[in-house]
Amino acid sequence: MGSSSSKAAKTAAGAAHRQYPKRVPPNTTASPASAPPPGPSVHPKPHVNSMRDETINRDAADPDFARSLRSLGPVQPSPTFSNSSVFNAYQQLSGGQSQPQMFPSPATNPALQILDARNRLTDAAETEFAQMGRRGFEGKEFLDVVLIRQALSLRDEKGLADADIEKRLGLKSGVVARLGVKGIVGDVSLDGTLGG
């Protein structure tokens, strides 16, 4: 901290003490004739063509680029931990060291199990919806919020038995019992009081 004039004075004083080399070091003096010219050696005239022709083939056969590729040699890819990677399969077939399995198999992957369960529930709900109103329909098993509130209200406020609630609302047998016992699960209004 301080005024800007004192900072300028320190900077000027530091510049006065700076020493520069008197001569160029010998290792940096290379003759410009020995260095290869930078950039491509072939400069074709630019043109647009939708077909591959001899000019494009000549341009693709850049000797500097080919020399760089030959000096690199075959590239060994770094192992990937993706189940869809073809490198892992090739490495195991060729006798290479296989990496430990980092990701769970699809059968034990929790994310895939959740998606599978969601698909099964969706299929069951669609089947139930298609069967509603038909002869032999046992009742609803998948409930919306309105039906849940009605069932809880009939159970907690009116004191109806589970079987009576299921019959009145067209629910499958045992659905009300799965909602939980009175006192554990109930209808709560926005002001925090029980009941609707």
Image: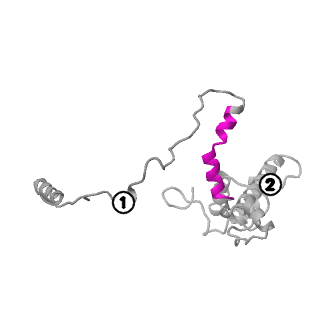
**Residue 184 drawn above or below residue 71:** below
Dot placed on the residue nearer the N-terminal end, 1 or 2 = 1
Q: Nearer the viewer, residue 60 or 189?
A: 60
Please indicate, yes or no, whether residue 161 appears anywhere in the rendered image.
no
Q: Position of residue 154 (x, y in %)?
A: 66, 58
* Residue annotated with mark 2: 139
User: Toward the viewer: 164 or 136?
Assistant: 136
- Label placed on residue 145: none
Examine the image and state in which quarter residue 188 appears.
Answer: bottom right
Q: Is residue 105 inside the magenta stretch?
A: no
Can you say which quadrant of the picture contains the C terminus? bottom right
From the viewer's perspective, is 35 left or right of 23?
A: right
User: Which one is nearer the viewer's eye here, 123 or 13?
Assistant: 13
Tell me the SS state at disc 2.
Answer: loop
In the image, the segment drawn in magenta is: 55-73
Residue 94 vs 69, above or below: the answer is below
In-image side of 170 versus 73 (left or right): right
Residue 160 lies in what quarter of the image? bottom right
User: Is residue 56 found inside the magenta-colored segment of the image?
Assistant: yes
Could you say where residue 155 lies in the image, as x and y percent from the top left? 67, 62
Is residue 139 visible in the rendered image? The answer is: yes
Tell me the quadrant of the picture where the N terminus can be found.
bottom left
Using the image, determine if residue 136 lies above or below residue 53. below
Which percent across, then down, holds residue 144?
A: 68, 52
Q: Nearer the viewer, mark 1 or mark 2?
A: 1
The type of residue carrying mark 2 is Gly
The residue indicated by pointer 1 is 26
Mainly helix, strand or loop, the magenta region?
helix
Q: Would residue 128 be found to the left or right of residue 2 on screen?
A: right
Q: Residue at point 14% right, 55% down?
A: 12
Q: How many marks?
A: 2
Identity, as a three-letter code, of the amino acid under mark 1: Pro
